[in-house]
Amino acid sequence: MKDDEIGKWFEAVFNSAGDASAARDLAHTQLRNAGLLPKVTLHRYMCKAKNCQIATVFQVGGRVLCAVRDYTFSPGLNAQVSVPAARKSKTLDGERHWPGQVYDVSELEEWGPQAGMSFECRHFHGTVIAADALRAVEGVEPGRPRRPTFLPAIPPY
């Protein structure tokens, strides 16, 4: 697919999905399932401790998006950071498996200099600032990402 075709495809997905969050999730899923995500990838974030891939930054339709993978907290940490009602309604399994999220990085940056994306794995818990993510992809051609950013191991909470 050429850039303009991808842009038109994304606009169609965006218009059919109903809301921006659903459109971003749907676009990421379709790109991943079709094997096209590597062709639009700009950058990756990995955990330094175990090389867990935490997030992929990609460009589609002129938008810079960041897909953060889903994650599972330990039972103790999960109880510490969430309430039963939220776990039941927001998790994939009703308890500990939290869904990933796809952020519009450019839109997020407009919220201010501290606006960021929550990144989680068993070894890292933290926020990557949207402006930092955009700086990391300046001048990067889709499908030709630079080396990943390795995030230091930080015990959750």
Image (spheres, grey):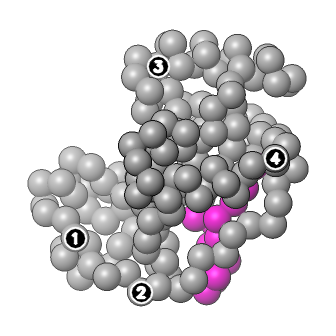
Query: What's the CA distance linking mark 4 and mark 3?
Result: 30 Å
Earlier-in-chain disc, 2 versus 4: 4
Query: Magenta region: which residues?
Result: 42-54
* Residue that label 3 marks: 17
Amino acid, disc 4? Gly
Is 110 situated above or below 48? Answer: above
Query: What's the CA distance linking mark 1 and mark 4?
Result: 38 Å
Query: What's the CA distance linking mark 2 and mark 4?
Result: 33 Å
Quadrant of the image for the N terminus? top right
* Residue that label 4 marks: 139
State whether residue 31 appears in this view: yes
| Residue 125 marker | none
Q: Where residue 54 appears, x then y in whole percent?
A: 58, 64
* Residue that label 2 marks: 155
Earlier-in-chain disc, 2 versus 3: 3
Earlier-in-chain disc, 2 versus 1: 1
